[in-house]
Each structure stands twice: as structure tokens, then as C-alpha cells.
Image (cartoon, rainbow, N blue to C red):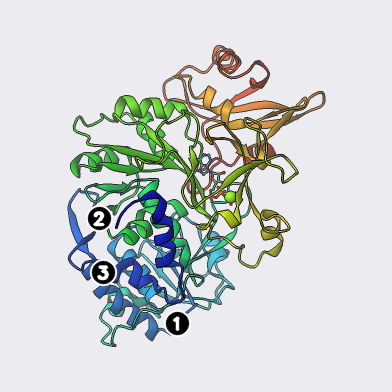
Amino acid sequence: MSTNVDTLVDELLKQYDRPDAAAAELLCRRHPRDAVAFTVVDADLSSRDVTYGELDEASGRFAAGLAGLGVGTGDRVATLMSKSVELVTALLGIWRLGAVHVPLFTAFAPGAIALRVTGNGTKVVIADPDQRPKLEPGPDMPAEREWRIVVTGEPSGSDVGFADLLASDAPAPDPVAVGGGGTLIELFTSGTTGAPKGVPMPLRGLAGMHAYQEFGLYHTDDDVFWNAADPGWAYGLYYAIVGPLATGRRSLLLRAGFSPALTWQVLSRFGVTNFAAGPTVYRALRNADVPVPGDLTLRRCSSAGEPLTPDVVTWAQEVLGVPVRDHYGQTETGMVIANAWHPDLVADIKPGSMGRPLPGWRVEVLRADSEEIAPVGEQGRVAVDVPASPLMPFTGYRNAPERTAERFSADRRWYFTGDVATKDADGYLTFASRDDDVILMAGYRIGPSEVESALTQHPAVAEAAVVGEPDELRGEVVVAHVVPRPGTHTGDELVAELQQLVKTRLAAHAYPRRIYVVDQLPKTPSGKIQRFLLRKR
Ligand code: ATP
Ligand code: MG
């Protein structure tokens, strides 16, 4: 397929947004059967290739087995699984039946799991053996449950074995066409700003995922592509598994948790050319005391999910030999804005900016409390122009009309992302903060992200989170919570240096009046800083 920027969005919408669209067909069966879908890498660096043909065959049998458990079109099937061939097989099997996939992050405790599988029509939960104990009835897991349990290991009691489902001798069902509007996935937002929200992702959302693979990541035929993000969250599910399957290209799947040493080994041993991960991964690689392999072959690195502070970009350029490009998206929308890697899209990277809207999206910055487009350089609400954004998949949260209504203008023209940014004359957007995180000090609006970027320039700072603290005189003042790098001094001197750094690098008024040196910052399970919890302290 061509990656012609002008025509690709239309081509993709024609493929994915049609009444007879079937995910199992689009993500697997249409690709050459002998093409490799994933190179699955184990913690000991052994690997094996899995082809689209093998995935089709296994997922067909798995779908037959699931149907035998009563799963049908529109039913929910959750996965509590690490990255593996079984996970990909399960996903394709679920979609083959026209059922809805609910991802569960493997670091979740029972309460977080129960929230996602209770009272929403979940028929089956598929769990890895190490995850299975979390499903036992307990204080946070109701004993009455509507779902069956499938385990990828040895089943006991009323559990069903994954292998037994694969051995089903019923004929593989034909892929069900749920159409572009049918729900493919139901996943929850990260919970950075409060309780996570349930997001139904329609099948036509595949058009945007496919487009980001082409435009944002520029995942080409000759790439060794690896997105290290976890498939329990949008970035990992959409762009480490689903997006690559949509393109029919090969990518790596690591069957192990994150460690800096292993990440370096995989990058080196498998000759990764195209790498994607959240900022925390890059920061952990930088902060770890592990030698960097001398034979890296990286051509493109991308990051998304949180602000990418300039210290990481500088480090990457020096150590990886390529800059990390910042991309912006949400669970609700998928990727929207990017310093795209496609050569026709972003020529100049502006450090600190998350880039320009991707093809298929129109994004504006609106003035606070109005729907007027803000002048160049003025901070305002980031909003998607829905009628002008054919790749926009989101129409509302599950069972939450009020929370949905807050996100759209009354006429539904605008979708409010909940983020604040500025746009420059060339259309580049620079992230300032979440709506809720803006600090209002003596009439000034201060975005924590810029202050954090300045603080992390200091060699003693591993991470920083900036919030407003109530102040009688000024309304709010800027305070910083700073995690030092191992082995650095953290006295009053450091505080004075950091304050000075912000004054000289950013602005005199934005310096943190108080700086707390802390061991760690409150984070979501996916590693995002929860500033609302710092404000409560
Ligand atoms: P919740 O909505 O439950 O509070 P969340 O917004 O963190 O959680 P996600 O959908 O995973 O849930 O994350 C999307 C948000 O992440 C964006 O709205 C934005 O605030 C932030 N984000 C994503 N990419 C970037 C980026 N490149 N720079 C800055 N922030 C980003
Ligand atoms: Mg959000």
C-alpha cells in the first residue's frame, strides 16, 4: 500500500469504516499467510517468529472454543495476560466472534480488575497462571461473578484451559462483521486525573491506528519495529499489537517485564531500528547504571503518554544517536498530534513541542471558557474539530452521559481533550498541562510541564512534579516535588540552585517557592504522575 499522505486517510477509512468490516479479516486474514506478524522474544533473548497464517489458524480454533463457552457478538471478554502469542491469539479469536476485548493490566490489584469486569456483560476472563489468584473471591473481588475463567496454564476447578479451547474440534467460525461502528475494545483511561473512564473503541478506530503506524511512527517494511509499551493501556494495545497487525508488518513482542538491562539487550540483539516507549522508559534507561551497547541500529524513536522533557531528547541524541520524537494522544482518540517520522510530514522538529496534528485531524487551541480560537501563542484548551477530523473515533464514555457531555461542546463540533497548550504560527503545539493542573498565581497562568522541564535539566534531578499550593496572598504558589538521582546531594543548596534554574531558564515568577525532596512520586499503574494526589497532600 502506498503511504501517500494525501490519499491514505481516505483509503483507510474506506477499508475500516464500512458496514461489512470484520476485525479478524482486516487484522489477520487479509495478510499473506507466511508473512511474520511477531518475533516473540523471551527474557533469555531466545525468539520465535509467528506468521499471520499461524495466528489465523490458532485464533480460529480459539474462537470456536470461546463460542462453546457461550461468547457471541457484542459480549465482553477480558484478558489479564502479559505480552505473548496467546494474547494475540485471544484478541483475534475474540474479534472473530464479533466480541469486545477488555484489556486488564497485569499490575492491577483485584479491586481494579473487578471495576472493569463487573456489571458490564463480561462473559469470560482469560488469565495467565500468575494472575489467576487475583480472581479469587475476596474483599475486593465479588464471589458472585457472571464470567467464566480461562487460564493459559493448567486449569483447576471450574476453570477452562486455554489449550483445551485451542483443541476445540468445532469448525472455526467465519469472522463476524460488526462494521465500522461496532465496538472492538473497551478500555479504561489511565486514571491520572481521577477515576478511570470506560472508553468504547469502535472498529473504525483501526483507521487511525493504522494511520499512526504509517505517519507518526513511520513503521516501514524494512524496519525492526518494537513498541515496548504494555498492552494493558492504549499506547501498548493500539500501537504494539493492533496497529502493527493492521499494517501486516512484523514487530517484536517481548515476553518479559521492563528492565533497563533487558531493553538494551533486545535493542542490540534484534537490531531494532524503530523504537517506541513512554517517557518513563527513556528516563529509566538514562538513570540506570547499565552500560549502553555500542552496536545500536536505531533510526527512529518515539514517545507518547506524558510530556517528553528536553533532557530526555538531549540524552537520546547523544546516547542513541537519534532524537526521541514526541507524540500526543489519548485513550479516547488514539494519536492526534505528532512530530511525525513520515518524511513528508514534519520537516523541522521544534524542541519542547509535541508537533502538529496528524493527517485526518484538525486541532485548535480555544480560549479559556469560550469556543473562540485563541491567537497564536496564547495558552488555551486543546480541542478536536470533530467534523473536520475524519479519524476521530470517540463518541462518548460507557454509561457516563455527564462525563461525556463535559467533553463536547453543545453542538458537538468540539471535543475538549482536557489539556492546555499553545499553538505557534507554523501550527506546532506545545503542551502546558492538564486543565486541572494549571496553576493560577497572582493572575498568571503557569503550566507545570514547563517548570518540570526546567527542573529536570539539573543533573541531580531524576524526576519532578510541579503543582499549585493554596496561598493567601497570591491564590496559589508553585511548589515542586523532586526525586533526586541516586548518589546526589540534596541540601538547601540544591533547593536554591533549582529555584535559580527555573528563574533563568523559564521565568522569574514561575520558580517554585517550596521544593520537597521525595523518594518517589504518586503514579498510575502505567507510570503517569498523579498531580491531583500531590495537591491533596
Ligand atoms: P484520565 O483521563 O483517566 O485522567 P489519562 O488522561 O492519563 O487518564 P490516557 O488516555 O492514557 O489517560 O492519557 C492521555 C493524556 O496523556 C492526554 O490527555 C495528555 O494529558 C497526556 N499526554 C499524552 N501524550 C502526551 C504528550 N506527548 N505530552 C504531554 N502529555 C501527553
Ligand atoms: Mg484523560
Queried on whether the Cβ of the residue with tag 3 lies below 8 angstroms from ligand 1, the answer reads no
Queried on whether the Cβ of the residue with tag 2 lies below 8 angstroms from ligand 1, the answer reads no
Q: Which residue is mark 2?
A: 250
Q: Which residue is mark 3?
A: 55
Q: Which of marks 1 and 3 precedes in the sequence?
A: 3
- The numbered disc on residue 72 is 1
Can I make out residue 439 in this image?
A: yes
The answer to whether mark 3 and mark 1 are in CB contact below 8 A is no
Could you give the CA–CA distance between mark 1 and mark 2, rounded to whole angstroms?
A: 30 Å
Q: Report helix, strand or loop for mark 1.
A: loop
Q: Report helix, strand or loop for mark 3.
A: helix
- The numbered disc on residue 354 is none
Q: Which of marks 2 and 3 precedes in the sequence?
A: 3
The answer to whether mark 1 and mark 2 are in CB contact below 8 A is no
Q: Residue flagged by tag 1: what amino acid is it? A: Gly
Point 71% across, 59% down: residue: 411
Residue mark closest to the camera, 1 vs 2: 2
Q: Is residue 515 left or right of residue 126?
A: right
Q: 393 or 296: which is nearer to us?
A: 393
